Image: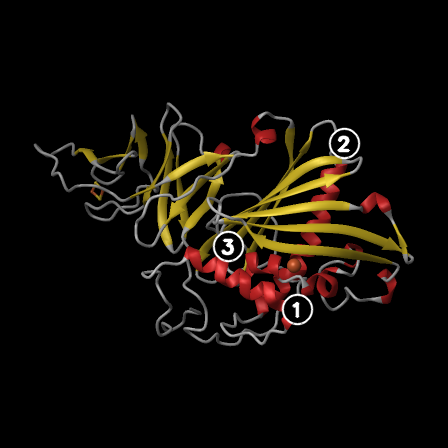
């Protein structure tokens, strides 16, 4: 179902698997052997530009069907897709009227702010309890994000703005989009798994992402060398963690300083990462990585690169391409692995356990745990 294709667009529609990439036959995954499917936090819904004023978009994420709309004065809202009257889908023919979304079936209107029904065209009185569920959302760094909390608790932190993007000093230079068949926790946990860097990401990006060939002798002349350290941040940013990564490359065994790069990967909650690049003379920029669960084991991952506008576009495009190759190596692992609640770790893997303790803050008592698998479903 999900694959490694890159394409532009909103979350919620799954492309076909990429036939170039090796996929092992899927074994049934054990129920109950992984954390709850949806951690609490902010998740990217779509790009702000994909929702012009006066429009409605259909969304499918976090196992929910939702409708996003933007009023003509620019305010974006996300509500449950299904109308509480008789269940019509508000995003399938609904329209924006003032600060409300109007259902296409009988014309009930629901206010984006609080979901309250403000008008029933054929009724004398609108009952007080008539409302549709609304989702807290915000727009930062050119994206619309929504807040998910299994208890219905409101946002407990704000999505940070990248000041250079807001000031237009760093400009958009491209993006990739992937669908990953794995539990969301696998993706951030990768940052704390420093041991895989040399083994999986050491072979040159020139050897591609097909793991059958990455260790081929043809590309042996170039290697990546990584030094990484992962740490949670102290209060009040306990929902953040940081991986500091020092990248060097060797060509025929000699260091190639042009490819020296410092990267600070700041994870903000379960679904957002800011990868800040610093290069001695090729400038600075950021890759915004967003991970949005569509279903328990289907993640939509978008990488957007913003880079100093006075640096030729080829530089950030090269960085994004190289990052994409390395990320696709991880995807092949994730798509075929199993999440182990009790992994067999050695002392050098200590930061993986530390990451799991840190990540546990995104689940609450009521976070849904997987029950017995339903027929025909993977979860
Ligand atoms: S189903 Fe929405 S108004 Fe009737
Ligand atoms: Fe990785």
Q: Determine the residue positioned at 28% across, 47% down.
A: 82
Side (left or right) of 191 relative to 95:
right
- Which percent across, then down, holds residue 310? 73, 27
Residue that numbered label 2 is attached to: 312
Q: Residues within 10 Å of mark 1 (few under 14, many from 20)?
A: few
Q: Indicate the colouring scheme.
A: secondary structure
Q: Cβ–Cβ below 8 Å for labels 3 and 2?
A: no
* Residue nearer the viewer, 282 or 65: 282
Q: Is residue 207 above or below residue 169?
A: below
Secondary structure under tag 1 reads helix
Q: Residues within 10 Å of mark 3 (few under 14, many from 20)?
A: some
**Earlier-in-chain disc, 3 versus 1:** 3
Residue that numbered label 1 is attached to: 348
Q: Residue furthest top?
A: 73
Secondary structure under tag 2 reads loop
Q: Residue furthest front?
A: 234
- Which percent across, then down, holds residue 13? 48, 51
């Amino acid at each position: 179902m999900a694959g490694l294709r890159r394409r532009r667009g909103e979350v919620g529609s799954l492309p076909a698997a990429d036939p170039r990439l090796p996929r092992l036959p899927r074994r049934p995954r054990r129920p109950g052997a992984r954390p709850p499917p949806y951690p609490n936090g902010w998740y990217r819904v779509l790009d702000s530009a994909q929702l012009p004023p006066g429009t409605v978009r259909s969304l499918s994420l976090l196992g929910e069907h939702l409708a996003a709309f933007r009023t003509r004065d620019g305010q974006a809202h996300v509500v449950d897709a299904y109308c509480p009257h008789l269940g019509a889908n508000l995003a399938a023919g609904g329209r924006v009227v003032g600060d409300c979304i109007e259902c296409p079936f009988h014309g009930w209107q629901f206010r984006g702010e609080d979901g309250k029904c403000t008008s029933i065209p054929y009724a004398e009185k609108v009952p007080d309890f008539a409302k549709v569920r609304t989702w807290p959302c915000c727009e930062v760094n050119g994206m619309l994000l929504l807040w998910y909390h299994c208890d219905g608790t409101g946002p407990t932190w704000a999505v940070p703005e990248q000041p250079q993007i807001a000031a237009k000093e760093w400009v958009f230079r491209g993006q990739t989009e992937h669908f990953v068949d794995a539990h969301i926790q696998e993706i951030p946990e990768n940052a704390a798994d420093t041991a895989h860097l040399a083994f999986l990401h050491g072979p040159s990006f020139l050897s591609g992402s097909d793991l059958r060939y990455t260790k081929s002798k043809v590309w042996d002349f170039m290697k990546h060398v990584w030094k990484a350290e992962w740490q949670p941040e102290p209060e009040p940013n306990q929902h953040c963690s940081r991986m500091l990564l020092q990248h060097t490359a060797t060509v025929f065994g000699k260091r190639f300083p042009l490819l020296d790069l410092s990267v600070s990967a700041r994870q903000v909650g379960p679904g957002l990462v800011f990868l800040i690049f610093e290069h001695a003379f090729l400038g600075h920029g950021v890759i915004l990585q967003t991970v949005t669960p569509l279903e328990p084991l289907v993640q939509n991952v978008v990488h957007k690169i913003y880079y100093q506008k006075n640096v030729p576009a080829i530089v950030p495009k090269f960085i994004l391409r190289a990052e994409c190759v390395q990320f696709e190596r991880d995807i092949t692992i994730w798509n075929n692995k199993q999440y182990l609640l009790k992994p067999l770790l050695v002392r050098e893997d200590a930061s993986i356990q530390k990451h799991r303790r840190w990540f546990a803050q995104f689940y609450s008592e009521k976070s849904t745990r997987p029950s017995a698998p339903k027929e025909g479903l993977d979860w």
